[in-house]
Image (tube, grey):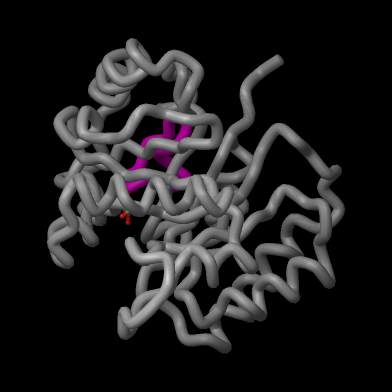
Amino acid sequence: MPSKKFLVANWKENKGYSQGLVDFGKILDLLRGRSMEESRELIVCPPYPFLPSFKEELARRHSGSSVALGSQDVSRFEEGSFTGEVSVRLLKEFVNYSIVGHHERRSRFFETGQVVAEKIELCWKYKISPVVCVGNKDEFRSLPPPRPGLIVAYEPVQAIGSNHPESPREVAEFYSFAARGWGKDAVFLYGGSVTKDKIRSYLAIPGLSGFLVGGASLDPVELVQMFDIL
Ligand code: PGA
C-alpha cells in the first residue's frame, strides 16, 4: 500500500482574520465532494488566533475529512509565567500537528537544537505530531530519536521564500542520508519555494511523503491544486 502523503500549509504571519476565514472556507469548498481518504492529509497552519474558528468550521463542514489543523510553533514550556507563549496544553484542543524548529524560528528567535528538542518532547507528551524543520544534516543529527508520528521537513535555508528550490537530486540525496538510520520511523517532507508548477518534479523521490509550503499555500486554489497532485 502506498504510504500516506502530507501537504503542510504554513501561512506564517500573513492574512487578516476575516481573509483567513474566507480562504479556509474556500479550501473546504474546493475539497467538498472528494471522497474521504486516508491516503492524503492537508494540514493548514494559520496564525494562532484563527485556530478556534477554523476548528469549528472544520467540524461543521468537513468532519472526517483529509484536512487537519496545525500550529506554526509551540512554547518550550508546558505552562506558567511565560508571557506571550502558547503551550501544547492549550493547543492540543485545536491542532493535531505543530511545526517546530522552522528556520525563521531558529535564525530570528535564536532557537537552538536543545530548544527544538524540548518542543518535540512536549508535542509527544500531548500527542501532537511535530513537523520538525531541519535545514541541513547537522540539524537533522541533533534531533532526538524518532517516534511514530514524527514528521521531518527538509528546508534548506537558501530555498525558503527564494523561488530557488533545492533540486530534486539534492533533496533525494538528503533523504537517502536521513532515512538510513531512521528507516520507517519518520515521515519525510521537502519545503522551500514549492509551487504547483514545481511540485511534480519531486514526486518520484524515494521516501518523500509530501511538502511543506509557505508562499504558495496562501492561495486556496493553488493549495488545493498542489494537494490534488500529491
Ligand atoms: P516557501 O516557505 O514555500 O515560501 O519557500 C516554506 C517555509 O518557509 O516553510
Check the picture and name the quadrant holding the N terminus: top right
- Residue 202 found in image quarter: top left
> For the point 29% across and 51% down, which residue is it?
101
* Viewer-nearest residue: 49 or 174: 49
Provide residue 99's location: percent of width, then percent of height.
41, 54
- Residue 107 found in image quarter: bottom left
* Viewer-nearest residue: 88 or 210: 88
Check the picture and name the quadrant holding the C terminus: top right
* Viewer-nearest residue: 100 or 60: 100
Q: Is residue 33 above or below residue 55?
A: above
Q: Decide whether residue 108 is among the magenta residues.
A: no
**Magenta residue span:** 188-201
Provide residue 215's location: percent of width, then percent of height.
37, 60
Q: Is residue 93 above or below residue 18?
A: above
Q: Is residue 66 left or right of residue 113?
A: right
Q: Is residue 72 left or right of residue 169?
A: right
Provide residue 162's location: percent of width, then percent of height.
21, 53
